[in-house]
Amino acid sequence: MKDSSGKCIVCERNVETGSKLSFCRLHLEAYKNIVENYGNWRNAYGDLKPEEFLRRLENNDYTGKWVKEVVRIMLSNRDLLQFFLDDLSYSGRKG
């Protein structure tokens, strides 16, 4: 899932070393927070599917800029969305 340019797919900063994704340090941290917090949102909202979770994050006034940018990229890129779903499944949080 890593781009050969070495630039973040969101902002063109250098990609974080050792990352499997084409995100800079800031966007990679936002991505990790998204993955880690899906379970909390699912507990709060019940049967919340991953794509609905992302749409809610995108439209939430309290969601930070970096997270919103990552969410928009994930929703527009099927490969990245699948990587996210795989990460949720791997961490045991997918429903």
Image (cartoon, rainbow, N blue to C red):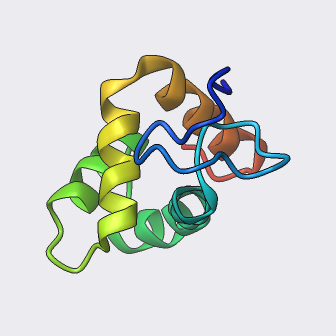
Residue 61 at x, y = what percent? Answer: 14, 75
Of residues 48 and 56, the one drawn nearer to the viewer in this rendering:
56
Q: Is residue 12 above or below residue 42?
A: above
> With respect to residue 91, does 2 lie above or below?
above
The foreground one among 66 and 88 is 66
Horizontal and vertical percent position of residue 22: 61, 37
Whole-percent x, y for residue 66 in the image: 38, 64
- Horizontal and vertical percent position of residue 55: 23, 48
Q: Residue at x 66, y 24 (%)?
A: 1
Residue drawn at point x = 14 percent, y = 60 percent = 59
Q: Quadrant of the C terminus?
A: top right
Residue 26 seen in this snapshot: yes
| Quarter of the rendering containing residue 82 | top right
Residue at 47% in and 36% down: 9
- Count every numbered label the image shows and give the total: 0
Foreground of the two, 39 or 62: 62
Left or right of 16, for residue 41: left
Left or right placement of residue 22 versus residue 43 in this view = right
Residue placed most toward the observer, 78 or 94: 78
Instruction: For residue 48, say whether it is visible.
Output: no
